[in-house]
Structure formats: C-alpha cells, structure tokens
Image: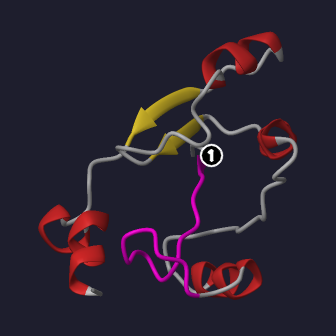
Amino acid sequence: MKRVLVFGSFDLIHEGHKPKFNENERVLHVKNIDSVDKVFLGNEGDKWKIIEEIKPDIIALGYNQSSYTKGLKKGMKERGLKVKIIRLKSYKPEKYKSSLLKNVSK
C-alpha cells in the first residue's frame, strides 16, 4: 500500500478555495470522508516537518496549487526523501472553478 499525502485547505471539498471554516472544523470534515485514513494539520512555519513525519510515497498536489510546490523536489532531495509528486486533475471545473464561484457570490 502506498502512503499518499495531499496538502490543502479542504473547505467542504471544495467550494473554490473560499474557506468558511477554521482549521479544526476542516479537520473534522475531512476525517469524515471514507477514503481518508488520517488527517494532520500542517505547520505553517515549516512545511517539511509534516513531510518528514509522514514519509509519504506520493505527494498529490492540486492542478493549480502553488503554495507548497516552490522548491519541493529540491528540498526533498536535500532531506533524502524519495517522494513522487503528482498533479491532480481539476474537479468539475465548470462548477467549482474559483473564478466562477467568485462571480456568483457578487
């Protein structure tokens, strides 16, 4: 079995990156998803801490996610971590694209 780590805010999976809930509420929501085994809060000051703790086989990033990607491959190599990085496809972009949701809420 592979260990997959996914970073994100996961605000009710997923209303276009418009957080409505605090991080503890989001953790509870994500824990209730059948396909999720464990949920961890990351460390804003040190993104490497959670990666080093979990030692994932794969890190799955959103198709347009950039907040955790800068220097990710280089940093893992420097720490001796062998992790495959994959990009997830956009989920229903015709409905959940941030720009569409922002226009609807105006």
In the picture, residue 81 is in which quadrant?
top right
In the picture, residue 23 is in which quadrant?
bottom right
Seen as rendered, the residue at the extreme front is 106
At a point 76% along the width and 64% down the height, the residue shown is 40
Task: Identify which residue, 21 or 38, lies in the foreground.
Answer: 21
Q: Is residue 67 above or below residue 27?
A: above
- Residue 43 in the image, given as x and y percentages of width and height: 84, 53
In the picture, residue 17 is in which quadrant?
bottom left
Q: Is residue 65 above or below residue 100?
A: above
At a point 30% along the width and 75% down the height, the residue shown is 102
The kind of residue on which mark 1 rests is: Arg
Count the numbered circles shown. 1
Quarter of the image with the C terminus is bottom left
Q: Which residue is mark 1?
A: 3
Residue 32 is inside the magenta segment:
no
Dot 1: few (<14), some (14–19), or many (≥20) neighbours within 10 Å? few
At a point 59% along the width and 78% down the height, the residue shown is 30
Label the magenta part by its dominant secondary structure. loop
- Residue 70 in the image, given as x and y percentages of width and height: 60, 27
Q: Which residues are magenta?
A: 4-20
Q: Is residue 57 above or below residue 10?
A: above
Side of 62 where 44 appears, left or right:
right
- Residue 36 in the image, given as x and y percentages of width and height: 57, 70
- Residue 91 in the image, given as x and y percentages of width and height: 26, 62
Task: Identify which residue, 24 or 66, lies in the foreground.
Answer: 66
Side of 63 where 91 appears, left or right:
left
Task: Tell me the element at label 1.
Answer: loop
At a point 62% along the width and 46% down the height, the residue shown is 3
Q: Is residue 19 above or below residue 47?
A: below
